[in-house]
Image (cartoon, rainbow, N blue to C red):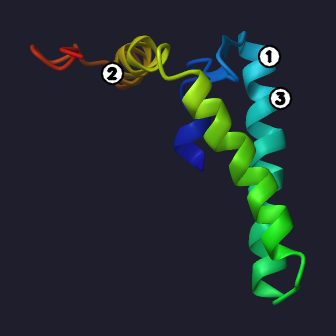
């Protein structure tokens, strides 16, 4: 989780490119949903099925709708990570 805070490339949600603030808010909301699914599963509650389908369904739909934006996001993420590390992007690393 620490690495998630080291560099922040805004991601897409439901096929839209989000800004830095919106991206952080969506990361928190989706992360809280995943934690709720995990806690519900560990407590062996019957609500795990609808809760899990809801949270992961939203994430799956979002990935499907934003699949055309994924190569650009990956390139930005690689560049941001390497810049944070203080090293250049390796040749051939961004051939998407």
Q: Is residue 24 left or right of residue 72?
A: right
Name the N-terminal-most of marks 2 and 1.
Answer: 1
- The kind of secondary structure element at disc 2 is helix
Sequence-earlier tag: 3 or 2: 3
| Residue 81, disc | none
Q: Residues within 10 Å of mark 1 (few under 14, many from 20)?
A: few
User: Which is more toward the observer, 65 or 73?
Assistant: 65
Residue 7 vertical placement versus 18 (above, below): below
Q: Which mark is residue 25?
A: 3
- Find disc 2 in the rendering and name its residue: 82
In the rendered image, residue 18, in percent from the top left (x then y), is placed at 71, 13
Check whether the beta carbons of the residues at disc 3 and disc 1 lie within 8 A of each other.
yes
Residue farthest toward the bottom in the current orientation of the protein:
44
Q: Residue at x 76, y 80 (%)?
A: 41
Q: Are marks 3 and 2 in contact (CB under 8 Å)?
A: no
Disc nearest the viewer among 3 and 2: 3
- Kindly indicate whether the residue at mark 1 contacts the one at mark 2 (C-beta within 8 angstroms): no
Quick one: label 2, few (<14), some, or many (20+) residues within 10 Å?
some
């Amino acid at each position: 989780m620490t690495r998630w805070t080291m560099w922040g490339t805004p991601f897409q949600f439901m096929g839209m490119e989000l800004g830095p603030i919106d991206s952080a808010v969506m990361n928190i909301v989706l992360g809280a949903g995943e934690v709720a699914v995990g806690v519900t599963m560990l407590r062996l509650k019957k609500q795990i099925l609808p809760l899990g389908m809801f949270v992961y369904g939203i994430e799956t739909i979002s990935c499907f709708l934003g699949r055309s934006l994924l190569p650009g996001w990956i390139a930005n993420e690689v560049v941001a990570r390497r810049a944070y590390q203080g090293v250049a992007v390796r040749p051939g690393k961004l051939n998407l």
